[in-house]
Image (spheres, rainbow, N blue to C red):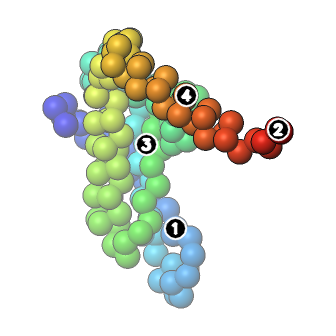
Amino acid sequence: MRYALHDDELEFSAIRSQGPGGQNVNKVSTAVQLRFKVVASRLPEAVKARLLALPDSRITQDGEVVIKAQGARSQAMNKAEALGRLVALIERAEHIPRARKPTKPTWGSQQRRLQGKSQRAEVKAGRSKVSG
């Protein structure tokens, strides 16, 4: 990633994890929820626009990225995982897709296609009933 994420742009909150885990799950908030406001960030405008245009359920209507990490048992590891997911999302938005140039099939490829079609037609014609 070419852009630095500043601490004032990231909002972390500790929440309780879901799923099995016994007493630890019931009393310790180890899961982390990361909120990143895309519009208010210092990312370039082009990257912001591509990031908001991504078809991702983690991006809200208000232009905020919400990432929940609860895979690890420690809050620090979940925080690092959430940050890594945000970086991967921004890297996806950084990539500028190349414009597709329409191409024409070559003369030789057209001839091979037509020859294959005629061979197939002969095979199918040979399956019909013989008259006589």
Which residue appears farthest toward the right when viewing the image? 132
Q: Nearer the viewer, mark 1 or mark 4?
A: 4
Measure the alpha-carbon separation of dots 2 and 3.
77 Å
> x, y percentage for residue 39?
41, 22
Q: Earlier in the sequence, mark 4 or mark 2?
A: 4
Alpha carbons under labels 3 and 4: distance apart: 61 Å
Can residue 47 be seen by looking at this rendering? Answer: no
Where is 45 relative to 5, above or below?
Answer: above
Q: Can residue 11 be seen here?
A: yes
Label ID, residue 131: 2
Q: Which mark is residue 118?
A: 4
Asked which secondary structure carries label 3, the reply is strand
Left/right placement of residue 46 relative to residue 66 reads left
Taking the image as shown, residue 100 lies to the left or right of residue 29, namely left
According to the picture, the residue beneath numbered tag 3 turns out to be 35
- At a point 51% along the width and 84% down the height, the residue shown is 21
Q: Where, by quadrant of the figure, is residue 129 drawn?
A: top right
Check disc 1 and report the residue beneath it: 16
Q: Amino acid at mark 1?
A: Arg
Q: Gap between marks 1 and 3, in whole Å? A: 16 Å
Circle 3: residue type: Arg
Q: Position of residue 72 (x, y in %)?
A: 37, 72
Q: SS at mark 1?
A: loop
Q: Quadrant of residue 123?
A: top right
Q: In this rendering, which labeled residue sits more in front, label 2 or label 1? A: 2
Q: Earlier in the sequence, mark 3 or mark 4?
A: 3
Query: Which mark is nearer the camera, 2 or 3?
Result: 2
Q: Residue at x 51, y 38 (%)?
A: 56
Circle 3 Cα neighbour tier, 10 Å, few/some/many (<14 / 14–19 / ≥20): many
Q: Which mark is residue 7?
A: none
